Image: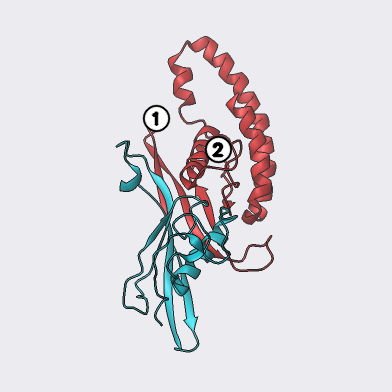
Chain colours: A red, B cyan
Amino acid sequence: MATVQIFHEEDGSTSTVTVSLQNGLLSDSLMENESYLTISTSIRKVDGTVFPTYVIRDLTDVAPGASSPAVNFTTLVNGYIEYFVSQAEFGQSSSSSSSSDGNSESSSSSSDGNSESSSSSDGNSESSSSSSDGNSESSSSSDGNSESSSSS
Amino acid sequence: MATYRIYDETAGSTKSVSVDFLGNILASSDLAFASDLSYYFRIKTTVRDTDGNTIPETVVLSLDELVLNGVKQRRTDTAAAYTSIDDMIQDYLYDFVNGHSANQHSSGVAYRAPMAF
């Protein structure tokens, strides 16, 4: 198992991303014993909801928005870490507060508005992911949409 | 970490191979001294082969790292990359258990005896 610790310097908190090898049955497979990775994180989204646990069977199971297939497992895992951090908007509040206050507030409120709309799509994905974490492939596609909105 | 247990009905004994997914700095791939983390599978066993030799542990960084010198899959004599993590692990386990003849599948691999049960 690989555990990555991410230090958030703004509030001194530490988040983790965990990648773990599993061996067993998956609900959406042919009931054959299978080896696969799961990747999960303690990072919360902007709206406070949790990320689903993603299942990785091969190098095409990349993070939402990442190029597929990944070159290797290092690229694949780094893609997920980048996705989690960007979705949580780590560091964005510091950049906006350090710039001009008036403009940043108006721009941040508009971006917050977008993120709220994206959080509703996240809510949908969360409901699907909470019902079955194994169906991470379907939830990852919906997360991919939210990522494009939050990154803009 | 996942532990795969292999039972041999002739000998009546079970051996195990452990497979772990890790994130560390790899000495072999840190040639630029960047100290970047690499994520990889580590496959190892304490079991010896029938010649009494240890079976070297293996690091797999990507699905195109094939078990026989990186050029051939062990079971199927193909040069294509593994299509899944499951396929990759199965092939490496197969190689651990069965060993291989010298130059297996024209891969230039060195001879290694099968696992001793």
Of the pair A112 and A80, the residue shown nearer to us: A80
Residue B26 visible in rendering: no
Residue A59 point in image, percent of width and height: 56, 48
Q: Secondary structure at mark 1?
A: loop
- Vertical side of A41 occupied by B56: above or below: below
Which mark sits nearer the N-terminus, 2 or 1? 1
Using residue B46 as the reference point, say whether residue B62 is left or right of it: right
Residue B30 point in image, percent of width and height: 33, 41
Of the pair A120 and A85, the residue shown nearer to us: A85
Residue A109 point in image, percent of width and height: 59, 20
Chain of the residue on which disc 1 is drawn: A
Q: Quadrant of the N terminus of chain B?
A: bottom left
The number of numbered discs placed on residues in the rendered structure image is 2
Chain of the residue on which disc 2 is drawn: A
Q: Residue at x 58, y 14 (%)?
A: A106
Cα–Cα span, label 2 and label 1 = 16 Å
Q: Residue at x 69, y 47 (%)?
A: A138
Residues packed near mark 1 inside 10 Å, few (<14), some (14 to 19) or many (20 plus):
few
Please determine if labels 2 and 1 lie on a single subunit. yes
The dot on residue A45 is: 2
The dot on residue A10 is: 1
Hey, what amino acid is under mark 1? Glu
Residue A53 point in image, percent of width and height: 57, 51
Of the pair B14 and A142, the residue shown nearer to us: B14
Of the pair B13 and A146, the residue shown nearer to us: B13
- Vertical side of B11 occupied by A95: above or below: above
Q: Residue at x 46, y 60 (%)?
A: B68
Q: Quadrant of the C terminus of chain B?
A: bottom left
- Vertical side of A64 occupied by B104: above or below: below
